[in-house]
Amino acid sequence: MSTSPPPSPRLHNPDLAPATNREWNGYSVFALWMSVLHNVGAYTFAIGFFFRGLNTWTVLAAMAVALVVVYVLMNLSGTIGQRTGVPYPVVARISFGVFGANLPALIRGVLAVFWYGVQTYLGSVAVSALALRLVPGLSAWNAHRLLGLSALGWCCFLALWVLQLLVVRHGMEAVRRYQNWAGPAVYLVMFVLLAWVLIRTGGAPGVEVSPDRVHGGSAVLQFASIVGLIVAFFGTFLLNISDFTRSSPSPRSMRRANLWGLPVNFLVFAVTVAVVTTGSARLFGHPVTDPIELVQRIDNTPVLIFATIVFTIATIGVNVAANVVSPAFDFSNIAPRYITFERGGIIAAIGSILVCPWALYSSPVVVDYFIGGLGALLGPLFGVIATDFHLVRRGRVEVDALYIEGRGPYWYRRGVNPRAMISAAIGAVIAIPVALIPAWHAAAPFSWALGAGIAAAVYVVLSRGGVADPIATGREPAHA
């Protein structure tokens, strides 16, 4: 019987330890994807593809191709968490080293903080619009501004901010329970919108959203761009899906939930969005691509209140899942002795205010260059992590060693794996210019895939020179 040294307090706390509670069953993961996709941001993201000059069925075919790719990649990434039971920053230790993992964790965490603030702000705009609709006298609260936001804006923003923080403060179990009903709730609003459109238009309005068409090479490029953009859209979750699948009871449960939650759910949602948008064009003379604006055109105050509340719930759901859970773990990973999951979530929440997201959202330069640049780093990180686990180590991980410093297969060189750093850097050097330089705009949708592929290829080549592997140590790898 082998004995391992105790875990280092610089690498371990109860939140970062392997999961013992496996309650994220198939429905919970499925509801997670519903929450991620059923919100204002995903609605406008999906409808944008129908204005690229392709007919609706070609757009749906491109979506199907992209979602099959995402499904495969998500299973590859989710398997790491499901098998080991550890969250994303600890997963990153396998390839980047026990201390080197802080870099990919911080990149993901900082990006999440910015989007946390932006999503909260967008949700607060909908709440502000509803408040003004119900109480017109509140318009006086918009007369004075502090740091670029009105008094009404601050009240609505902070209200959503507090609600999200309350969910996170109760841990991952509270997140799971919230997602279980928040994601499906948006379908109620979508079906209300769909029924309203069908009734007002006297039947099925069709699914052809845009009259414009492209042909030949331009059509092929648009098809490929849709595939690339959808894959990149899921780039954040492709990294930190292990934060959730670490608590999945079995690989089969995870794969089944990903199948229903990603390809099937996304396509149903996209078709509904297309029909609703086409109907709005017939009703108002132009397509309404913002669901909040469309809801506000319904001449029924109770329905308006209900729809706005549900969309707000959806905003909280996607924010908690995509932009709070990850930095909570990521910041905890930096100093586990002092930062718990709850404290990491509080740090992320405070950061989301300090970045003044209303100013960020109104500045295309900041969104494109700062947030876009960070986003281009996600592909190379995924390429290294997935390649190391599935190709180099072939799924063998010594979980206990992920919490040990000074020795072991993940210590590398003073806790950092130079091969992973070099591979990710080479992928980033290529991906970031492709994503940001205007002259390469046509190739920008492929920056995530390009960075991931190059980083993966470089890592495989560098790893041929030898890699600290659990097998090489003579110890039997442990699986969670």
Image (spheres, rainbow, N blue to C red):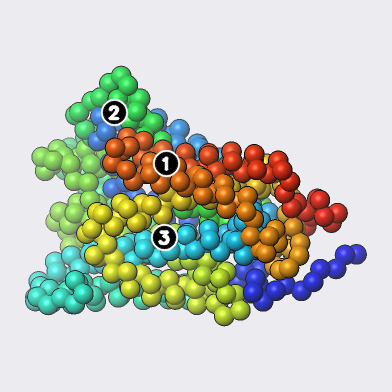
| Quarter where residue 228 is shown | top left
**Marks 3 and 1, how far apart in space?**
17 Å
Q: Earlier in the sequence, mark 2 or mark 3?
A: 2
Q: Is residue 71 left or right of residue 138?
A: right
Where is residue 463? Give x, y as percent: 68, 44
Q: Which residue is denoted by mark 2 in the rendering? A: 54
**Residue lying furthest top:** 216
Residue 35 in percent (x, y) is at 42, 56
Callout 3: helix, strand or loop?
helix
Q: Earlier in the sequence, mark 3 or mark 1?
A: 3
Q: Amino acid at mark 2?
A: Leu
Q: Amino acid at mark 1?
A: Ser
User: Is residue 128 visible from the viewing direction of this image?
Assistant: yes
Residue at 49% x, 63% y: name it: 106
| Mark 1 lies on residue | 447
Tell me which residue sits at (51%, 45%) in the image.
426
Identify the residue at horizontal 43%, vertical 43% (top origin).
Answer: 431
At label 3, counting other C-alpha atoms closer than 10 Å, the crowd grade (few under 14, some 14-19, many 20 or more) is many
Residue 72: % across, % down: 56, 40
Q: Which mark is residue 111?
A: 3
Q: Residue furthest bottom?
A: 338
Residue 133 at what x, y percent from top left? 14, 66
Residue in the foreground of this view, choosing between 295 and 88: 88
